[in-house]
Image (cartoon, grey):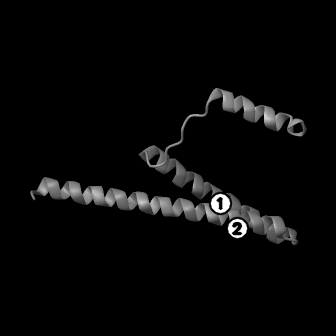
Amino acid sequence: MNNSQSSTSQSGSAQMQDKEILEDVLTSQKHLTESYNTFANECVTPNIRDEFMRILEEEHQIQAEVFDDMKKRGWYQTPAAEQQKIQQAKQKFQNPGQQ
C-alpha cells in the first residue's frame, strides 16, 4: 500500500471515529437534559431549582452545538417537513380540545 492509500485509510478511520464520538456525545447530552429536566420539575427548593434550570440551559446549548456540528458534517440527516404535516401540527396545537 502506498502513502496516499495509507493516508486515506487513516483519515477515513479517524473520520468514522469522530462520527462515533459525536453520536455518543449527542446521546449523552439527550440523557443529561432529560435528567436535569426531571430534577428541576421535582425540586422543592427554589434556589436549587434555579441552579438545575441554569445547568439545563447549558446542557441544551452543548447539545445544540453538537447537533449543529453533526448536521454540518452530514452525519445527522433531518428530512424537510412536508407542508401538509406542518399544517396538521399547527391545527392540533392551536385547537387541542377538538381532537
Residue projecting furthest to the front:
99
Can the viewer see residue 67 in this picture?
Answer: yes
Q: Quadrant of the C terminus?
A: top right
Of 23 and 46, which appears nearest the observer? 23
Residue 10 locus on image (x, y percent)? 24, 60
Locate residue 48, reporting x and y percent: 80, 71
Viewer-proximal residue, 78 or 61?
Answer: 78
> Badge 1: how crowded within 10 Å, few (<14), some, or many (20+)?
few
Q: Amino acid at mark 1?
A: Glu
In the picture shown, does residue 90 fall above or below 52? Answer: above
Q: Residue at x 87, y 72 (%)?
A: 45
Q: Which residue type does callout 2 highlight?
A: Ser
Residue ID at (61%, 30%): 82
* 15 or 88, nearer to the observer: 88
Q: What residue is rendered at 81% in x and 67% in y? A: 49
- What residue does disc 2 label? 35
Residue named by callout 1: 58
Indicate which disc, 2 or 1, sits on the residue closer to the N terminus.
Answer: 2
Instruction: Give the spatial CA distance, label 2 vs label 1.
Output: 13 Å
Q: What secondary structure is found at the residue carrying circle 2?
A: helix
